[in-house]
Image (tube, helix red, strand yellow):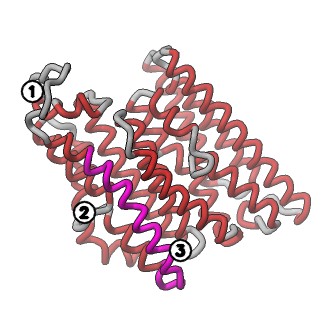
Amino acid sequence: MSPQANLIFIASLLLGTTITISSNHWIMAWTGLEINTLAILPLISKSHHPRAIEAATKYFLTQAAASALVLFSSMTNAWHTGQWDITQLTHPTSCLILTSAIAMKLGLVPFHFWFPEVLQGSPLTTGLILSTAMKLPPMTLLYMTSSSLNPTLLTILAILSAALGGWMGLNQTQIRKILAFSSISHLGWMAIILIYNPKLTLLNFYLYAVMTTTVFLTLNTTKVLKLSTLLTAWTKAPSLNTMLLLTLLSLAGLPPLTGFLPKWLIIQELTKQDMAPAATLISLLSLLSLFFYLRLAYCTTITLPPHTTNHMKQWRTNKPTSTAIAILTTVSVMLLPASPMILTIV
């Protein structure tokens, strides 16, 4: 793909995201979501591989259905209340349809089936955009309508997402699929707290985006796509692999790393809201995802594969680690001591 075309698509993504985030009117928010969907499709299918074309088709069909539901939900609300304002979503049926539409956009269970397949068919850089930037506009819509949504429905979706995200990731060997199920599991944590403290949802999303960006950029640097190649990638950039280990453990939510902060705050908030059983359940379910993060971390740091592998050990690269990866890794690992300052902002 030519640099000019790439620039146009990236600029369109930025435009679509900005329109959705900054709009008060449902039609403008819907327009931004559509621009985003159309701009990411060429980036998914740019390799012209059958799997990439299949991923782009699945993505288009799912997002088109979700966009139609967003439009239907806003029109139903406008029909009953005369309001097109996003924050004035008060009709119960509209709230229900919107929750389903945004769950489909994000990949929350039970609308998650498209996400691992699309991520597996996309290049790593496109996968990074799908896992982070493309989730920001739907998250913003959830944040703006959080006071109107149904708490029981969101809690059920959240617990199912944490359960299935962890459970279905256990048996995977493709790293992009593992990261897709990791994303579904994290979305569960974001959804469960949305009604009670929407700012915590955004904080969790920002920290998740930083950690996922670090993992994707590191994998892109070492050109690793599956566990068997991860076993022998340590020879390429040993220091980068060591930092990848810490980032993966942070993504798992282990203290004293950054990823522990949102989980800690969410459990605390849920307990304050008399939702201790839900907090206990989602904490136990996150142990499922901890297993596959630990498996990834083990494959990252193992220095001699325990069995003969088909992959040649690769030569160490002399290229210095990019500044972006260095900064992102530092934030992904060392932000927990700054939690008092973050709490004053939240």
The spot of residue 273 in percent (x, y) is: 53, 83
Q: Give the number of the disc on residue 197.
A: 3
Asked if the stretch drawn in magenta spans residue 271, the answer is yes
Residue for badge 2: 257
Residue under the point 39% across and 36% down: 176
The spot of residue 124 in percent (x, y) is: 38, 31
Residue for badge 1: 316
**Residue that sits furthest to the front in the current view:** 307
Q: Secondary structure at mark 1?
A: loop
Check the image and report above or below for 293 versus 36: below
Disc 3 residue type (three-letter)? Asn
- Provide the residue span drawn in magenta: 270-295
178 sits to left or right of 199: left
Q: Secondary structure at mark 2?
A: loop
Q: Nearer the viewer, residue 122 or 13?
A: 122
Report crowding for label 2: few under 14, some 14 to 19, many 20 or more residues within 10 A (C-alpha). many
